[in-house]
Amino acid sequence: MPSFAVFLDRDNTLIFDPPPGYLADPDKVQLLPGVVEGLKLLLNHQFKLIIISNQSGIARGILTHEQVIAVNNKLLSLLKKENISLTDIMYCPHHPEFSSASEVECRKPSPKMIFEAAEKHSIDLRNSYIIGDSFSDIKCGNNAGIKSVLVKITLSDEEINNLKKEVKSLNFVAGNFLEACKFIAADFTEENS
Ligand SMILES: [Mg+2]
């Protein structure tokens, strides 16, 4: 039985990341509305859950790997209390202004983290999805050839219209995380019935 995944952006998709971003304090980790219910729905549909996150604060010298890992671990512990476990968390610490061209290859909108995760966890990308709140998430999904769902958290209506013009496909715009997961569950069921 092939496995399939929903790739998840972390900041402002699963957890609050108020401006200026670069969340470093695990005590400030807070799940966004609908995240627990949405992830449970995806797990009920046998999706693997994999976070792929840009953490350029590391290249910028604003964050350390230890701080990013501490925030990730806090997120994992909040989810574990709800009996939700993730398959993997991947992050790209680089940024083009501070890193070499080869280092920055992992950074979304590059699909590299998705391809690496697919290889590592034997994931069939034809039945996989990405959920995120930004241009780079949707472009990353397009670049990997998977369906892309935007959660309307940080982008304005105008920005979303611009995004739609820029990308090959944006499969759904959800008002919150649970809505995004309901779209995926319904779409997956329809594709595989
Ligand atoms: Mg984000």
Image (tube, helix red, strand yellow):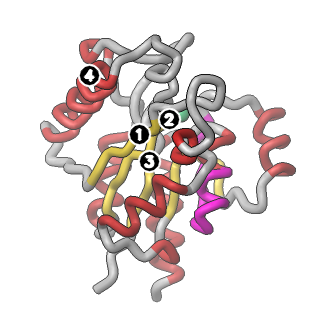
Asked if ligand 1 lies within 8 A of label 2, the reply is: yes
Q: Please give left or right for residue 159 compared with residue 188 in the image.
A: right
Along the line of sight, the residue nearer the viewer: 94 or 180:
94
Q: Is residue 192 magenta?
A: no
Q: Nearer the viewer, mark 3 or mark 2?
A: 2
Q: Which quarter of the figure has residue 157?
A: top right
Question: At x 84% / y 41%, what residue is drawn?
Answer: 162
Q: Residues within 10 Å of mark 2 (few under 14, many from 20)?
A: many
Q: Please give left or right for residue 176 compared with residue 166 in the image.
A: left
Precedes in sequence: disc 1 or disc 2? 2
Q: Residues within 10 Å of mark 1 (few under 14, many from 20)?
A: many
Q: Which residue is mark 4?
A: 66
User: Label 4 amino acid?
Assistant: Glu
**Which numbered marker is on residue 8?**
3
**Which numbered marker is on residue 91?**
1
Q: Which quarter of the figure has residue 65?
A: top left
Q: Which residue is mark 2?
A: 54
User: Label 2 amino acid?
Assistant: Asn
Q: Please give left or right for residue 81 compared with residue 24 in the image.
A: left
Q: Nearer the viewer, mark 3 or mark 1?
A: 1
Stretch of the chain drawn in magenta:
139-152
Q: CA distance from mark 3 to mark 2?
A: 11 Å
User: Label 3 amino acid?
Assistant: Leu
Q: Secondary structure at mark 3?
A: strand
